[in-house]
Image: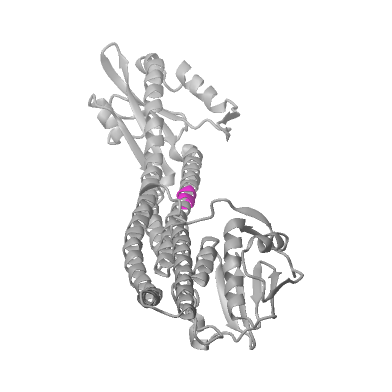
Amino acid sequence: MHLGIRILFGFFLITGLAGFFVLRIFVAEIKPSVREVMEDMMVDTANILAEVAADDLHNGTMAQGRFAKQVGAYARRPVDARIWGLDKQTLDFRVYVTDVRGTVVFDSSSVAVGQDYSQWRDVARTLRGEYGTRATREVQQDDRTSVMYVAAPVKHGDQVIGVLTVAKPVSTVQAFIDRAERKMLVSGLWLLGLSAAVGVVVTLWVVLSIRRLRRYANATEAGKKLPLPRIPGELGDLARAMQAMRQRVEGRDYIEGYVRALTHELKSPLAAIRGAGELLQESLPEADRQLFAADVLVQTRRLQSLVDRLLELSKLEQRQELEQPQIGLLSECLESLLALALVDRSSIAIELLASSQPAVVRVEPGLLALALGNLLDNAAAFAPPGSTITLQAQGSTIVVQDSGPGVPDYALPKLGQKFFSTVRPDGVTKGSGLGLAIVQQIMAIHGGSMHVENTHPGLRVELRFP
């Protein structure tokens, strides 16, 4: 399983479980909370009505008295109220009054008059001086049919002479409960969706950052040059630590490799200079002395070229990215770059062919001129005298083609490695192997690549830009 999927799955699992339990608690608390509020209001109502009914109950005129008429008028009163978006069009209180023995002497619904309610919890507890309330289901298995009863003592002076109970079906507030639950569920789903979106964004950021680090590490392992990825936070610290570690390892390997390769390359010219110097100490004919002196100069120039190219390659290997890039059509800047490229054209001709499918690229002209110079110099060293080297821009690729003998197939993958070179057409001399290494390094800084292939005759080198 991919890292991103694991992180996303873990985030969803934690968020989903937390959201589920929180929503379940909230939804479970809505109905009891509404009932508690309703009970609180019914306590106030019952006590107010108990005061109003006291005189009629004491005088024995409960059934025909003023209280009965007022409650009857209440029941017949029309109502049309819009409460927070919900319509209320009925008055739902049922009121009944019992005497001190628990017998119903008044019932606003006219169904319980004369019945003994002394065992009902609301009446019994109130007559004992306690808080009397009960909730009774009309259908035992359906909680929605519950009716809440709240009682208050009816007093004459300090003496309890009866009980007044206010009843209200829970179903009358069920619409408010359902709406609150729906709002809570919708809000919870939005919250989960938002959490999921945040989780996706965070996961993508983490995964993409790790992939950038992995790409940087893989490129480092492959010897490619990539700029340090800019990542904030701890992953950025890890990236910088990786770069520091890479630089230390590269620095050590760089020095070790250079010392070995340079020692090998210096042996031949130094041996030639030493041999010529020893012979020049002897008495020699003028022609031989001139020959050995010329050999010393040739080997000295060879050493100078080697040192110059080593210094140039060393500077390039320390660079991670372009310093003075320019953006434009590759075909337009190729002619000016060719003029900057230093190459001996005394024995060969360089022809710039028309470009095909010109593309916009991002290059550093100075570096590209150096690469072309080394590439053309290498081609000129292997091309027959009087031949032509062609140069062409094809899209985002520069193609250099010579008509020389090419190189052995086994050597193609090694071209561009430091100090690797093949024997030139004269069968004796070899180059330093640094020219194509410089070209390779310049292409790596541009984020491109160098591709070499035999064309029989000749060698075709492509500089491919991104």
Q: Where is residue 146 in the image (x, y as percent from the top left)?
A: 40, 42
Q: In this view, does 350 lie to the left or right of 213?
A: right
The magenta stretch spans residue 249: no
- Location of residue 287 with respect to 161 vertically, above or below: below
Q: Quadrant location of residue 222? A: bottom left
Image quadrant holding the N terminus, namely bottom left
Looking at this view, name the residue that lies furthest to the left. 128
- Location of residue 70 with respect to 194 vertically, above or below: above
Between 52 and 391, the residue placed more toward the observer is: 391
Looking at this view, name the residue that lies furthest to the right. 354
Color style of the picture: one colour
Which residue is depicted at the point 53% across and 83% down?
Answer: 424
Image quadrant holding the C terminus, namely bottom right
Between 188 and 330, the residue placed more toward the observer is: 330
- Location of residue 12 with respect to 121 vertically, above or below: below
Which residue is depicted at the point 66% across and 81% down?
Answer: 385
Which residue is depicted at the point 54% across and 65% down?
Answer: 443
Between 249 and 23, the residue placed more toward the observer is: 249
Q: Where is residue 378 in the image (x, y as percent from the top left)?
A: 57, 74
Q: In this view, does 201 lie to the left or right of 381?
A: left
- Location of residue 108 with respect to 55 vertically, above or below: below
Q: Quadrant location of residue 449? A: bottom right
- Residue stretch in magenta: 193-198
Q: Where is residue 459 in the image (x, y as percent from the top left)?
A: 61, 81
Q: Main secondary structure of the magenta part?
A: helix
Q: Where is residue 446 in the image (x, y as percent from the top left)?
A: 55, 61
Which residue is depicted at the point 31% across and 63% down?
Answer: 252
Q: What is the total number of numbered labels drawn onto the structure image?
A: 0
**Residue 443 visible, this angle:** yes
**Residue 60 visible, this angle:** no
